[in-house]
Amino acid sequence: MVAIRNIALILSLVVLSLSASSRPAGPTVAEDPDSERDGNSSLFAQSAAEALARDFPSRDISFLLLDAHTGRVLASRWDHPDAPIPMGSLLKPFTALAYGEHHNYQYPSHTCRGTSTGCWLPRGHGDVDLIAAIAHSCNSYFRTLTENLTAADLSSTADRFELDRPGPEAIGPELAGLGNRWRTSPLRLARAYLELFRQRQQPGVSQVLDGMALSARSGTGAQVHRAFPVPDVLVKTGTAMCAHSPHAPGDGFTVVLTPADNPQILLMVRVHGVPGAQAARTAGEMLRRIEN
């Protein structure tokens, strides 16, 4: 097994695997002419590509694997990753930063009472702050956070992270991904998460990243750790309206950066017709295959 701390080696290996599999459902892997091509590396690259094709052949699973340092796509199976689509709660970290920009990065506490306050969890999350709201993807908290925000209020944050701007008609919880009026492309959003980590010293960002770390430990992203038992990763999950065929009530999304203290790769996964917490399990299983 290749240690996670040697994930940089994994990047050079995975990048080599463009020709490792010709199966239609297999991943597309970018080729890097600067990667080392010794025998062991080539064998590992072939093994990684074959594992992705063998263990995740379903067209219900879409993914993007990025080099965390460059934002370069290393491997992918995602139809039209540049096309804006609803991304659900994956947008919440950026909504939080937009709120912070207009409120001196002072975030409220909130009591989530579940269904009665508009959360996905019927019993509610109880008392939550921003970190807990990110970790548990608390809709109730973000309904409160976006109560007085407009699409224009999010424009500078969207530009800062090179996201597509929300439509001018988007209001309230739609600005936290609860609906389909803020659409951005999966590739832009994946790179926005990389930029989020690069800006970790900026106001508000450390709280968002702390929420993603907590998500991996005990929040909606905990299934990543159960499938991929490494000490620290950063995770955000989301569930969004299905935007492709065949239509489903919703799709689950998960973003994982690993390792948490110095990400080497980012994996974004979409699983058709399931919630984000279930997509997290698939993301963890994919990372475990890449590491093995």
Image: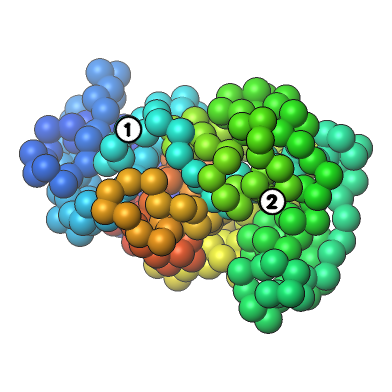
Residue drawn where x is 35% and y is 59% of the image: 248
Which of the 4 quarters of the picture holds residue 204? top right
Residue found 79% across the figure and 66% down from its top: 128
Total numbered labels: 2
Q: Position of residue 241 (x, y in %)?
A: 46, 53
Q: Quadrant of the N terminus?
A: bottom left
Q: Does the image show residue 6? A: no
Q: Secondary structure at mark 2?
A: helix
Vertical position of residue 167 compared to residue 240: above or below: above
Q: Position of residue 9 (x, y in %)?
A: 35, 38
Secondary structure at badge 1 equals loop
Q: Nearer the viewer, residue 97 or 216?
A: 97
Depth check: give the residue in front, 120 or 290: 120
Q: Position of residue 187 (x, y in %)?
A: 44, 33
Residue type pointed to by label 1: His
Q: Real-space Cα distance between discs 1 and 2?
A: 26 Å
Which residue is painted at 37% across and 40% down in the image? 65
Q: Is residue 21 visible?
A: yes
How busy is the neighbourhood of tag 2: few (under 14 within 10 Å), some, or many (20 plus)?
Answer: many
Contact between marks 1 and 2 (CB within 8 A): the answer is no
Quarter residue 18 falls in: top left
Q: Residue 201 has which mark? A: none
Label whose residue precedes the other's in the sequence (1 or 2): 1
Foreground: disc 1 or disc 2: 2
Q: Is residue 222 left or right of residue 102?
A: left
Residue 58 position (above or below residue 120): above
Q: Is residue 135 left or right of residue 255?
A: right
Query: Which residue is tagged 1?
Result: 80
Question: In the orientation shown, which residue stands out farthest toward the left?
Answer: 22
Instruction: Give the residue type that dot 2 points to.
Output: Pro
Q: For the residue carrying disc 1, how many other residues have a C-alpha within 10 Å: few (<14), some (14-19), or many (20+)?
A: few
The disc at residue 173 is: 2
